[in-house]
Amino acid sequence: MIRAACILVIASSISQIQIAAAFSTSPSSTSSVQALLSGNQEQIQSLKNVAKSISTDDDDAAVVPTNDVFYLRYLLETSYENDEERIEALKRNLEWRKSDGKHIVMSAHDAIKAARSDENSKKWNNKPVEQAAPHSDRIGKYLTSVQCITTSLPSSNDLVYIVRAGKIDDKALMSSVSVDEMIEFFLYVKEVNAAIADIRSVETDSLIKVITCNDLSGVKLVGGSSDFRSALSLSSKKAVELYPALSGRSLLLNLPSLLGALVKIFTPLFPDAVRKRIRFEKCEPLKNVDNLMQVVKSGDVRDEFIEQIDMLSYGE
């Protein structure tokens, strides 16, 4: 199980939920990765040939991935209208990885190697991942295990991002970094989790997805940092382009009463696919803990949390 503070993606508003509407909400364990890879071998090789055509001998595997699951996700992404659109999306991703995103993906993959450096590659050491994050010396003090953490669901091996937006001092945070620096941090986080999802997909023979679990306890409906919201919005938009078929269901938990009332009004207006992708519920295990390590470490709190999130992630 991965225990990683500040490995997160935050859905900051209802308007951002629509980006994940195309993905399945069924447990990953129902999809054999080996069967998917075997059944799509020809198409995967075709995408790898596209990657090879725009890569050079100097490109690291972090820049031009060799894991077939990376390419399989392009085939499973349902938002592409045709193969041409799929190939163009892959090309844009690789161009980003070779240019603006190179330092992000290189740092992320080097950190993952260090985090899994024990002889069995089962014990996760999060320190290298935290230290390699862009601008972590300034951001790390505001995003700790109080605000965010990553764990996994035993039933499916899917990753779960847990984020407590109401606990983030976004104004103080954004007084220390620029919008562009915050975007780099968020994309680094996404790259780490995407790479881990691909690695564990092969190891577990199940297509690993990422479930976003937003605890909105204490969230203020007005105020906050507009720069932080901008960084969230821009990084989320970019991440959708870079990481196809990765997102699972988005859970918005413990909404403030006024926001909950608005949700009841507007949810029926969402397309069916969007309504299936999001859940608005109460989650007492999150609401009642001071530090998210309490839902990661073994014990009654984790057991209750896992049971509820498992139901919300895959139930109707």
Image (cartoon, rainbow, N blue to C red):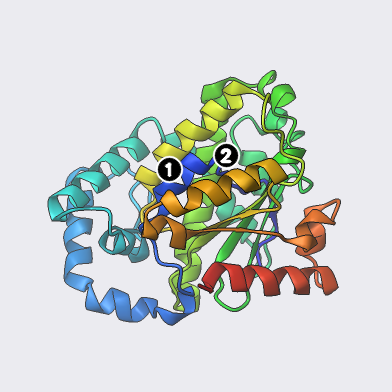
Q: Is 63 displayed left or right of 181 in the figure?
A: left
- Which of 176 and 302 lies nearest the eye of the viewer? 302
Instruction: State the image coordinates of residue 278 (x, y, percent, origin top left).
Output: 51, 57
The residue type indicated by label 2 comes to Ser
Residue 254 position, x and y percent, is 71, 52
In the rendered image, residue 180, in percent from the top left (x then y), is placed at: 51, 24
Please tell me in which quadrant of the rendered image residue 66 appears. bottom left
Front residue (pair 179, 195): 179
Tell me if I can see residue 208 in this picture. Answer: yes
The type of residue carrying mark 1 is: Ala
Residue drawn at x 18%, y 66% as measured from the top left: 43
Binning the other alpha carbons within 10 Å of mark 2 as few (below 14), some (14 to 19) or many (20 upward) gives some
Which image quadrant for residue 171?
A: top right
Find disc 1 in the rendering and name its residue.
Answer: 239
From the top left corner, tell me how far across and down residue 303 is, in percent. 76, 74
Name the element at disc 1: helix
Q: Is residue 241 left or right of residue 128?
A: left
Say which label, 1 or 2, has the lower sequence index.
2
Q: In this view, does 307 lie above or below 266?
A: below
Q: Which residue is drawn at 86% across and 51% down?
A: 290
> Could you tell me which residue is drawn at 41 percent across and 35 percent down?
101
Label 1 to label 2: alpha-carbon separation: 14 Å
Residue beneath disc 2: 12
Q: Mark 1 packing: few (<14 Cα in 10 Å), some, or many (20+)?
A: some
